[in-house]
Image (cartoon, rainbow, N blue to C red):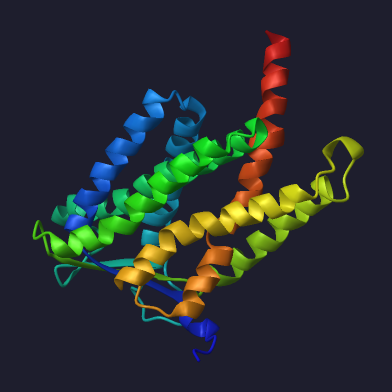
Amino acid sequence: MESFDFSSFKEARRNFQYDYIFIDAIFYVLWVITLIKNRKWKALKAGLVSGFIVYFIDAIWWWNMPAGKNYPVGTYVREYWIGGIQMPHPLGSYFWLKFWADFMMCFSYSMFMFAWLWIVLDNYKEKNLKSSLFYSFFLFGAWLVTPFLSQLLPLDDTVVNTVRHMDTQFTTWIVNVIIGYSILSILYVGGIKVSREPRILGLVFLVGCLGSFFMEFPLFLSGIRPTGISFLLFEVVFLFNQGAPYLYLLHDKILPFLGKKLGSRG
């Protein structure tokens, strides 16, 4: 039986072929078209805003942040090797090669994941299970077939290796989850009468785990994420649940409050 070696979780790796990016882009376009066709404007906005935030954190901030004292000088939190060549600092002529990999892992991911989250939260309030199931199957189906199509189709088999050194981020992940769900517990379990709704805690946690599973299981199954079951379980619990409680508060409390304030001023 595989043991839980938490030290190995600090190296989040992906190994995939470059045409994975092209196939993901096709599903990305279909996803955006579907959102527009069904007038999911708020979900689109959630995906776009979060896309820029995630891109900035991963592709710019972590790309330029030293990995820490446990690594050789010149090692950064996010690193890439494309076609066996380590992407340099500065990128120079390799900018676009890395950009499209970043777009897939950051912006496309966010447009799928955060738009899906927004739709599920809206549908929970509207009790529209059918819509939630449709978008969930769309998201999971697209992410499930993409790695295998990439491996089957000889479009561009250039190998991309990427790693996120999480020595300096590991504790932050866990603390974010604890703080986020503590806030939800205060507001919805032990809060004021009008906000008390204990099942919200379970709903948000379930959606957070489900979103992480949608992303991590296809990577694990296809071998793109070269890790074991323990890493998969850790990612399912912690990856998306870092932000899920705060996004729910944004959806349920903060944006409606701001909308009322701005509306009253008008």
Q: Nearer the viewer, residue 76 or 225?
A: 225
Q: Is 260 situated above or below 20?
A: above
- The image quarter containing residue 12 is bottom left
- Whether residue 168 appears in this view of the structure is no
> Above or below — where is 74 with respect to 118?
below
The one of 133 and 210 positioned closer to us in this rendering: 133
Counting from the top left corner in percent of width and height, residue 142 is at 33, 50
Residue at 47% in and 25% down:
41
Report x, y in % for residue 146. 27, 56
Report the side of 142 relative to 190 (left or right).
Answer: left
Q: Residue furthest front?
A: 130
Regarding residue 13, the answer to whether it shows in the image is yes
Q: Quadrant of residue 197?
A: top right
Quarter of the image with the C terminus in it: top right
| 100 left or right of 118 in image | left
Q: Looking at this rendering, what residue extends furthest in the right direction?
A: 193
Q: Position of residue 66 (x, y in %)?
A: 42, 68
Query: Which residue is painted at 45% across and 41% down in the image?
Result: 135
Number of numbered discs on residues: 0
Residue 116 position within the rendered picture, expressed as x and y whole percent measured from the top left: 48, 42
Q: Is residue 39 above or below residue 55?
A: above
